[in-house]
Image (cartoon, helix red, strand yellow):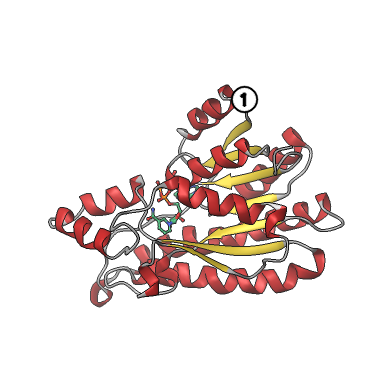
Amino acid sequence: MARLSGKVALVTGAASGLGAATARRLAKDGAAVLLTDRDLAGEDVAASIASDGGQAAFRLHDVTSHSDWAAAVEHAVTDFGRLDILVNNAGVAGGRHELMDHSYDAWRQILSVNLDGVFLGLRHAGPRIAASNPNGGGSVINLSSILGKVGMAGAAAYCASKGGVVLLTKAAALEWAPLGIRVNSVHPGFIDTPMVAGALAEREDGNEMRVALMAAHPLGNRFGVPREIADAIAFLASDEASFITGAELVVDGGFTAQ
Ligand SMILES: NC(=O)c1ccc[n+]([C@@H]2O[C@H](COP(=O)([O-])OP(=O)(O)OC[C@H]3O[C@@H](n4cnc5c(N)ncnc54)[C@H](O)[C@@H]3O)[C@@H](O)[C@H]2O)c1
C-alpha cells in the first residue's frame, strides 16, 4: 500500500515549482490532492497528475484571503471527504529591496503572502485536520527557507517572513501536539524553479550571481531540483515522521552548514 493512501492533502502554490512537484509526489504516494494557486496554470498540473492515475483537483485560491481559505478547505472536504495534510507552500520572492528605501507596501505584500498566508492556512485547515483525525495523524508542512535561518542583503522582508514561519511552526507544533497533529518547517536552499530564475533574471549580474550561489551549495556546487524538496515534504507528511514535530528540515546541499 502506498504510504499516503487514504490521506487527503491541500497544497498551496501548486501551479509551479516546489508546489507542483510536491502535489505530484504526494499523489504518487497515494494521497488525494487539492492543488490551489492564484494562477490557473495549476489546472494543468492537476490534470497531468490525474492522467498519470493520481487523484487531484484544482481550485483558484489567494492565500492572503480568509474567504478563499474557507472555500478551499471546504472544497477538499467536499471532493475527498476529509483533510489530513496541509502544505503551506505559496510564496513570493518579492524582488530586491534595500532597507534604506524599502517601501512599506512591498514589505506588507511579501509578509502578507509568506507569513500571513501560513497563519491563515493553519487557522482554516487546522480545525478540519483535527476533525478528520480524532486519534491524531494530521501533518502540516510550512515552507520556510535557508533565508529563514540566515540573512541575505536586499531580502529583509523575505528573510523576516521566512524567519517568522519558523517560530509560527514551532508554536503551532506545541499547541497541536496534544491533538497528534505534527507541524514542521522545510528549509530549501536555492532550488531550480521559476522563482529563482525570475529573481536572477531581474539582475544585471544574474549570470555571475547564479554561479556564485551554486558554489555556495557544497553538495555538488549546484541548485537543488524540486523533486529533492518534494521528497522531504512527503516524508514529513507520512507516518514515517510520526515522532517529528516542530522540526526544521533543512534541504540545502550544505549551504547553512558553513
Ligand atoms: N526555489 C527556491 O530556491 C526556494 C528556496 C527556499 C524556499 N522557497 C519557498 O518555496 C515556496 C515555493 O517556491 P517556488 O520556488 O516553487 O516558487 P514559484 O514562484 O515557482 O511558485 C510559487 C507559487 O506560489 C503562487 N503564489 C504566489 N502568491 C500567491 C498567493 N497570494 N496565493 C496563492 N498562490 C500564490 C504562485 O502563483 C506560484 O505558482 C515559496 O514559499 C518559496 O519562498 C523556494
Quadrant including the N terminus: top right
Q: Quadrant of residue 61?
A: top right
Judge by depth and name the residue closer to the eye, 139 or 249. Answer: 249
Q: Indicate the amino acid at tag 1.
A: Gly
Residue 241 falls left or right of residue 91 = right
Q: How many marks?
A: 1
| Residue highlighted by disc 1 | 53
Name the outermost residue toward the top: 51
Q: Is residue 63 visible?
A: no
Q: Residue at x 32, y 52 (%)?
A: 196
Q: Residue at x 77, y 57 (%)?
A: 127
Q: Residue at x 81, y 49 (%)?
A: 132
Name the outermost residue toward the right: 135
Residue 53 falls left or right of residue 13 = right
Residue 138 falls left or right of residue 53 = right
Residue 113 falls left or right of residue 236 = left
Q: Can you say whether 191 is above or below 46 in the image? A: below
Judge by depth and name the residue closer to the eye, 235 or 81. Answer: 235
Image coordinates for residue 161, horizontal then vertical, percent: 46, 68
Image coordinates for residue 118, horizontal then vertical, percent: 57, 60
Q: Residue at x 26, y 63 (%)?
A: 96
Q: Is residue 21 visible?
A: yes
Q: Can you say whether 4 is above or below 55 in the image? A: below
Element class at badge 1: loop
Image coordinates for residue 4, horizontal then vertical, percent: 70, 43
